[in-house]
Amino acid sequence: MERVRAVKSSMFRIRGREVFGATPPSAVVGEAGWPRVRVYIGEPPEVWGEEARAYDDPRLLWGRGLEEIIKLRSYMAFGYRTSVGPWELGELPLLAVSERPVDVEMRLARDPAPGVRFDLREKPMGPRAPLERVRIDGNPAVPRPLDKLMSDDVKAGEAVVELYRRGVDLYIIQRAFSLGLLGAGHRRRLVPTRWGITAVDVAVGDYLAGRVRDMPEVDGALYGYGEYLDNRYLVAVVPGPLRFFYLERWVYGGRVAEIEVVEDPRGRRSTVDGGFEAARVAVLETLAALGRRGTVSIVRWIGEGYYVSVGNWQIRETLRRIRLKPLDEEYGRYVALVGRDPLALIKQSRRLDEFM
């Protein structure tokens, strides 16, 4: 809490109710009161064009320090409206699924109080206030496949997979799903962002798993290591059926808390966990690119330096950058860093077989 307060003391404070800038794009659907929830549109004041993208795009945020990410996010103002579905929001949903930043003028109903909100799945949110009016100065660039599916009566899960197959950015798909732009017309509703992120990861991951299951096995044991924001990731893949063992190790003051998720070869999970689903998508993308399948174990070690969460995107983006390679002498050093051996976890086949 002391570290959070220290960061908050240096945060930007938005003055006045008029906010001019470009949305990166950025949108968050709240959870309280569902199905009638708040929809937040965010923009950094006086930041325009491509420069605004760095305030929200996970690929541009990745690599920055924790305090820098918090400061960037605290600089963004969020205006919100309350709604049940996209039909009540006018053009706001189109802003959120644009492929490029869009200039927006917002007038807030009151001065936004300084502050930042943290969530395990989503990026931190800066000052917020009700949206009195909004003027869009530009045309949102909605991806063509999404523009078509927004008019079609297709199940949301199927639409998610189709968009991913067509190369639409995963984060645009997540926002489209949360804003109720996908699915059977009569059933479309707003989906809280923290639910939508995991739902899209599950749909895309299951699609990728369906492809990878039929691929040849890896020739031998492979591993990859990555770290970011005092999170360390060690991945091991061995020949065998496609199945996952995921272990999170939270380390604080010499104490360790562990969370585990097991997935059997049929894709049945022992529990639903957003961190696991984000990691699973990234590893499956790597296996699909290699054209190989195997039994996967992932250890995520979380240290005291990660004192607030910036969202599941950092899991996904860090693991996307990991390259799998044959075992070498470095593997033992990485095992020491994360405190558990993924290969040993895989060998605990009795636990996996019990779950099957």
Image: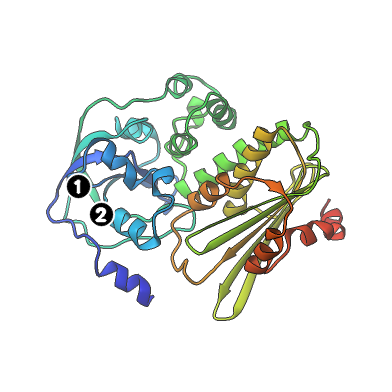
Left or right of 274, for residue 178? left
Coordinates of residue 136 in the picture (x, y in percent)? 21, 31
Left or right of 75, for residue 161? right
**In the foreground, 320 or 157:** 320
Name the amino acid, label 2.
Tyr
Q: Which residue is mark 2?
A: 75
Coordinates of residue 187 in the picture (x, y in percent)? 51, 31
Q: Which residue is mark 1?
A: 45
The image shows residue 269, relative to residue 176, as above or below, that is: below
The image shows residue 338, relative to residue 31, as above or below, that is: below
Q: Residue at x 36, y 56 (%)?
A: 69
Q: Residue at x 68, y 38 (%)?
A: 287
Mark 1–mark 2 Cα distance, whole angstroms, equals: 8 Å
Left or right of 52, for residue 224? right
**In the foreground, 328 or 216:** 328
Pointers 1 and 2 in contact (CB under 8 A)? yes
Q: Earlier in the sequence, mark 1 or mark 2?
A: 1
Q: Callout 2 environment at 10 Å: few (<14), some (14 to 19), or many (20+)?
A: many
